Amino acid sequence: MFAFPSSFFEMWLRWHAYRKYKRRSRHSFNRACFKLISLMRRLPANSLIIDAGANVGDVTAYFVGQGMRVIAFEPDPTALAILQRRFSGNDKVTIENKAVGARAGHAPFFQTAAVRTGAIYQTEWSSLDRRNVHDEATTSVEVVDLVAYINALPQKVSILKLDIEGTEAEVLEAILDAGVETKIDLIVAETHERFSPELAMRIGALKERIAARPISNVELGWR
């Protein structure tokens, strides 16, 4: 599970130290984390955050602890049950039992066999995108068109966190195509290039697109 650094000063030191390193994945994560924490310090209470791929709610809990409102998307039924118990009665959290995508509809949803025998940590591997770790699809989930969803909200989204296990490319492409990134202060996304050569090519193209414009509020180094 993700854990934030113990203090803003610690994060600041780590970020400036890691700038000198050539380990790009660590550098990218620290940059994303630094931007997120810096922004959180400036946001007013009750700013709106979307946690897409909330899992059992560790990052949601951090946002709520800082006084923010969170819309938490989680399609995995096992993780969802924990998420719902954890935030039951909390009016700062809206839980959406749905996946996010580039278009609305329904899609098969894949889990590992171990999830159904109690391996909660493997819910982090559940996905709309089937891989060799997954069993046959055991359920179908509703998929929300994230661009349309954001555009319909009555409140500005300050932060969008994407950790959606391989479907982030299509969502990010849709966001950039529609210009929705200009309406959000910060987007942090975990990318999963290792899942397939096709996904690696799409993420590579997104990185080039972000660098070329340039787009400074989209960070693909989350993990």
Image (cartoon, helix red, strand yellow):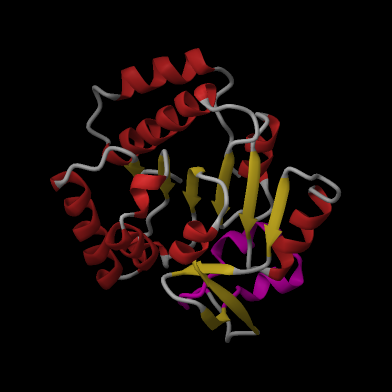
Residue 80 x/y as whole percent = 72, 62
Residue 180 x/y as whole percent = 37, 54
Instruction: Please say whether residue 119 is visible from this viewpoint.
Output: no
Q: Residue placed at 39% from the left, 37% from the top?
A: 29
Front one among 16 and 120: 16
Looking at the rendering, the stretch of residues picked out in magenta corresponds to 110-133
Extreme left residue here? 212
Front one among 10 and 159: 159
Query: Which quadrant holds residue 218?
Result: top left
Up/down of 184 relative to 41, above or below: below
Query: Which quadrant holds residue 46?
Result: top right
Magenta stretch encompasses residue 128: yes
From the viewer's perspective, tell me whether residue 31 is left or right of residue 67: left
From the viewer's perspective, tell me whether residue 20 is left or right of residue 7: left
Front one among 204 and 176: 176
Up/down of 147 relative to 43, above or below: below
Instruction: Please say whether residue 111 is visible from this viewpoint.
Output: yes
Residue 43 x/y as whole percent = 53, 27
Q: Residue placed at 56% from the left, 17% from the top?
A: 7
Q: Residue placed at 60% from the left, 73% from the top?
A: 112
Magenta stretch encompasses residue 125: yes
